[in-house]
Image (cartoon, rainbow, N blue to C red):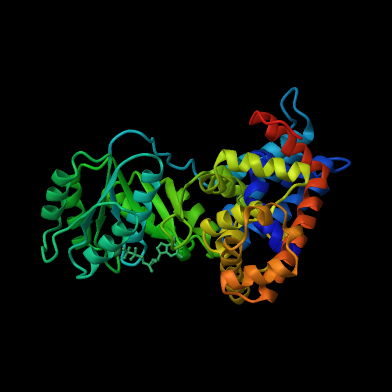
Amino acid sequence: MGNYYILMGISSFYMVLESLSESLKQILNKVANATSVDPKLVREITREMQRALLQADVNVKIVLELTKRIEEKGVKEKPPAGMGVREYLIKVIHDELLSILGKGHAIKLGKKMKILLVGLYGQGKTTTAGKLGRYFQRRGMTPALIAGDVHRPAAYDQLKQIGDMINIPVFGIPGETKAAKVVREGLTKFKDYDVIIIDTAGRDRLDDDLIEEIKRVAAVVEPDETFLVLDATMGQQAGVHAKGFHDAVGLTGVILTKLDGSAKGGGALSAVAETGAQIAFVGVGEHLEDLEMFDPTRFISRLLGWGDLKSLLERAEEVITKEEAERIAHRLMSGKFTLKDMYVQMEAVTKMGPFSRLMSMLPTGMFGISPDRSQIEAHQKRLRKWKVIMQSMTKEEMDDPRIIKSKRISRIARGSGTSEDDVRELIKQYNIAVRTMKNITSNREFRRRLERQMKDMGGEIE
Ligand code: GDP
Ligand code: MG
């Protein structure tokens, strides 16, 4: 029960976490805290890394090479002058992990660009077109979509539906069979837009027809970016496809989709990187918000099963304003956590997407949660009910739920169309939340970070 409240508090909790590189140091605390860095410790650590990497489907050969290099450097090499043995070992591990993910392909925001999406059938091209649109839209640019898949009859409708959902214009010519023609007209129509994203048709496999068509379309588009959209559940097979397309059409980057819930994510990532094609974005869910710029540093933590704190943090920042975060941080510090605060956080967490997604970003087992579908659905159902109940409360009641006694309870229940038990349940949950928040804030490490963060934000602690 308490775990759930920590989850609700997470949006603000992670506001105050340091960058990933620092949490990586935490992961490697074992090294830092060991009484001595000896060959035995190094072996122990590489053994643990092997297990984690193999579990993430990273190629055995890559894993063995990597851990061998770590053992060699960690045991035999002397650290450079001025660097301690421990720091050096931590750096070696960090750098070696980075080396298997490639550099990533960062997109410069703010300049006009045309993005061509290519890939096999069912990999997520059309969905990703929408996600990219959303990505740029959120960053203040004007995106537009072109439906260049002229083979599947419903392809235009699918893209149009996606575009309508996020208010991004879609161009297509239903019935037209020449992709190049559709694309040419679309480009003219959207010439004033910042980012034009072109969806294309796929096939079951990379064949000559597909290459020919992509080439024709590419000649019309003259794309700034040509992204291969690739399903991460393919695991190490992803590397073969990336190489095939890279050789055929010259990619500027790869977008790996369906990394959510894919045990083979590590395999796909490292295999693509090994071909020399850089990963630009990763798709991490079915929602249009579920796209992240690929940052290898962040992925190190995910590969090791430590969750991806930094992207969680960024996502939280997108849904909660800085002021809101600061307000909640204040509340946390001073122990004044109102129902309104809980409501804001509940909303933020809901906006972050399904719980399963959120939880997959957390360090495995950190809160002892192993979410199964039914549990998640039950939580979401309760959330909806609580929202309705809170909407029937007065400001005073929200500020200080302790004043809610039996008379108010029946009024709120009537007003919200719920039962008195429902209202009591919410108040009980609130009390648990307050206790949990108190526990979190009394944690010295947390408090220290929060204080530093508050200072950075220019806030005062009450
Ligand atoms: P296309 O044939 O390449 O255009 O693929 P679609 O965009 O139609 O996607 C195929 C299926 O994959 C759809 O059901 C999408 O919802 C799903 N999909 C796409 N990207 C992701 C992702 O990142 N995560 C998950 N879980 N599903 C995805
Ligand atoms: Mg499609």
Residue found at x 73% / y 38%: 449
Residue 193 found in image quarter = top left
Q: Locate residue 345, reporting x and y percent.
A: 61, 53
The correct choice, above or below, for 180 with respect to 188 in the image is: below
Up/down of 440 relative to 84, above or below: below
Residue at 75% from the left image edge and 27% from the top image edge: 83
How many callouts does the rendering have? 0
Which residue is situated farthest in the top direction here?
Answer: 81
Q: 7 left or right of 228? A: right
Is residue 72 something one can see in this rendering? no
Judge whether residue 203 can be spotted in this image.
yes
Residue 444 coordinates in the image, percent (x, y): 83, 42
Q: In which quarter of the image is ligand 2?
A: bottom left
Q: Which of 163 and 68 is in front in this view?
A: 163
Q: Quadrant of the C terminus?
A: top right
- The outermost residue toward the right is 35
Front residue of 423/305: it is 423
Q: Which residue lies furthest to the front in this view?
A: 407
Quadrant where the image shows the N terminus: bottom right
Please state the horizontal and vertical placement of residue 106, each as a whole percent of the image: 43, 39
Where residue 423 sits, quadrant-wise, is bottom right
Please indicate whether residue 358 sits to the left or right of residue 151 in the image.
right
Percent of width and height locating residue 309:
62, 48
> Which residue is found at the position 66% from the left and 49% from the top?
67
Q: Which of 63 and 117 is in front in this view?
A: 117
As drawn, 235 above or below 76: below
